[in-house]
Amino acid sequence: MSNEAAAIGTADRRPVHALIVGAGLSGLGAAIRLKQHGFDDFVVVERGSDVGGTWRVNSYPGAGCDVPSQLYSYSFALNPEWSHSFSPQPEIYAYLRKVADDNGIRDRLLFDSAMTGARWNTETSRWDVDTANGNFSAQFLISGAGVLAEPSLPDIKGISTFEGKIFHSSRWDHSAELAGKRVAVIGTGSSSVQIVPSIAPEVERLDVYQRTATWVMPHLGRRYTGLERVLFKRVPGFQRFVRGLIYANREIFVVFQVKYPKLAVLLEIVGRVKMFLEIRDPEKRRKVVPTHRLGCKRMLVSNKFYRALDRKNVDLVTDGISEIRANSIVTEDGTEREVDAIVLATGFHVADSPTFNLYTGADGRTMAECAEEEGPKVYKGTTATNFPNLFMMLGANSGLNYTSLIYIIESQLNYVLSALTRMRELNLGTFEVKLAALDDYNAVIKKNMATTVWATGGCQSWFLDKAGNNSALWPDFSFRFRNQTREFDLTAYETTPAVAR
Ligand code: N01
C-alpha cells in the first residue's frame, strides 16, 4: 500500500481505488478488465467461497444455459472446449474458474466476505464499504451483486411447518435423497423446466404446481463434433465468426419482443405443435396452453419438459396452493397431496432485491428507498443520481432475455474503463449523473417499452416492478446498448476535481 493510499483511508478502513462486489460474471469480468488496463489497486469481495456467482450456486439437477455456448463466454476468453452448443452448468462454472486462474486475479479475490453495507461518505468523497472480512474506503464501487441472486420464497400458509426437505432451486440440497420419494416442484419457470425432467424418472411421484402456463420452444442444443472443436481451436477467426453468426441470429428475437410483438403468433404455432406432439394426456395438454403472448414471460426452452409432464408418475397441478402442512400440500379445491420433499422453483427478488438496502447514497437514503420513492432510475443501466462513483453492473433496464448477458456486462465494462480513464486524465475525483440526463434517458426507455410484448402481452413477470414498470430489460437491439456505452459521456455528469492528499 502506498503512503498516499494509507493517508486516504481511516484507521480501520483499507483504502482501495476500486472495490468490486461479487465474483460472478460481472465482478470477475470487471476485475480482469481493470487489471488489463493497469487499474491495479482493487479488491473483489465475494460472499461465497469461490468465483462463479449464479453458475456456482445454481447446481440443481439439469442446470444449464439456454443461451448458446458460443455467446456465453467473455470476448477476451473464448472457449473452444465447450462440449455442447448449449452448456451445462458444471462446464460454465469450470470455465469461470479457469478464466480467473488464467487472468491472474485470484490474489484480489476475498472470499467469504459478504458486503454488509456501502455508504457514500460526503466528507471523504469515497465509499465506506463494510464486509464480513474487513472494512474498506473505496474511491469507486463496482457492484456485481447479480440480478437473479436473491431467492424469492413463497409466502404460503404453513410453509414453515413442513417436516420434509424443502429448499429453493438455487440452493439445492444435495443431501436430500429424492429417488423413490414423493416430490413437489412449485413453479414452472426456466429453472423448473430443467429440474422437472431431470428428477421425474427417479422419484416415485412428482407434483408440478403451475400458477401460469408459459410458452415452451424447442431446444436446439447438440453435442459438438470433434471436428468442430478442432476448428474452433486451430482455425484463426473461425470461432469468432460462428459466434458472430449466432449473435446476429439471436437479435431476431428483438423483432418479436420489442418491435412487432404480434409476429410472435408465428412462434406460438411452433409452441402449439410442440404441446400436441409431446403431451398425449388431453387434460395436461389443455393445462399447458398459455393465455399471454409469447415472450411476455421469459420464453422457456426444452425438449424434455412436456414429455416429463406427460409421464404417469407426474401430476400437473393448476389449482392454487392454499396451505402447506407437515407432510402435504393442500390446494384451493381442498385436495391434499402428501409429499416428502418440496422444491421451490419460485424465482428471485429482482426489482425488490434486498441487496438494494445495502447501498446508502449521498443524501442518506438507500437504493431501495430511492427506488421505492422514485422508481428504479438508472442511467445507461450503470450509474444513478445520489450514488456518486458507483457503477452498477446489470442495473435497471440493462437485462436481456434472449441473448447473452455477458454482452451487456462487457459493454458496461467498456463504460467503466472509459470513465476511470477520463477521470484520471482530467484529474477528477467524483462523478454523479445529472438528474436531467437521467430523466431524459429514462423517458426514452419508457417510450420504447410501451409497445413491447412485456408491456402488452397480458402477463405478470419478474421483469415488472411493483408499479408494473419493466425496470429489468433493455427494450432495443443489444448492439444499441453497446453503442451507448462505448465512451463515458462526461457532459451527462457533475464532476469534482480530485482532492490533493
Ligand atoms: O424463476 P421464474 P426461475 N405459488 O421467476 C412460480 C434465469 N434462468 O428460477 O409465472 C406458486 O421464471 C411462478 O409462477 P408465475 C432466467 O432469466 C436462466 O425459473 O409467477 N407458484 C413461476 O412459474 C429466468 O427467467 C436459465 O405465475 C409460484 C415460477 O414460480 C430466471 O432465471 C436457467 C409462486 C418462477 O419462475 C428465473 O427463472 C434458469 C407461488 N407463491 C433460470 N411464486 C438459463 O438457462 C412463484 N411461483 C440461462
Image (cartoon, rainbow, N blue to C red):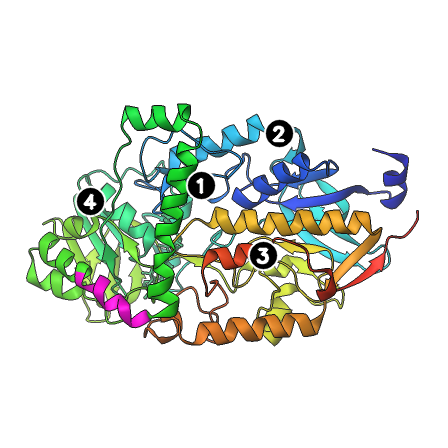
User: Is residue 103 rendered magenta in the image?
Assistant: no
- Give the residue type at disc 2: Arg
Which image quadrant for residue 387? bottom right
The mark nearer the N terminus, 2 or 4, is 2
| Residue type indicated by callout 3 | Thr
- The label shown at residue 200 is 4
The secondary structure that dominates the magenta segment is helix
Q: CA distance from mark 1 to mark 2?
A: 18 Å
- Asked if the residues shown at circle 2 and circle 3 are in contact, with their CB atoms under 8 angstroms apart, the answer is no
Is 161 left or right of 448, judged from the image as shown? Answer: left
Q: Which residues are magenta?
A: 261-269
Q: Give the residue type that dot 1 points to.
A: Trp
Residue position marked by numbered label 3 in the rendering: 355
Relative height, residue 231 to residue 24 (above, below): above
Instruction: Kindly identify which residue carries mark 1.
Output: 55
Crowding at dot 1, Cα within 10 Å, few <14 / some 14-19 / many 20+, comes out as: many
Upstream in sequence: badge 1 or badge 4: 1
- Do labels 1 and 4 touch, CB within 8 Å? no
Residue at figure coordinates x 33%, y 30% from the top left: 83
**Residue in the image at 52% along x and 43% along y:** 25
Q: Nearer the viewer, mark 1 or mark 4?
A: 1
Nearer-N-terminus badge (1/2): 1
The disc label shown at residue 96, or none: none
Residue 266 shown in magenta: yes
Can you identify the residue that label 2 sits on?
106
Which quadrant of the view contains residue 347? Answer: bottom left
The total of numbered circles placed on residues is 4
User: Between disc 2 and disc 3, whose residue precedes?
Assistant: 2
Q: Quadrant of residue 268?
A: bottom left
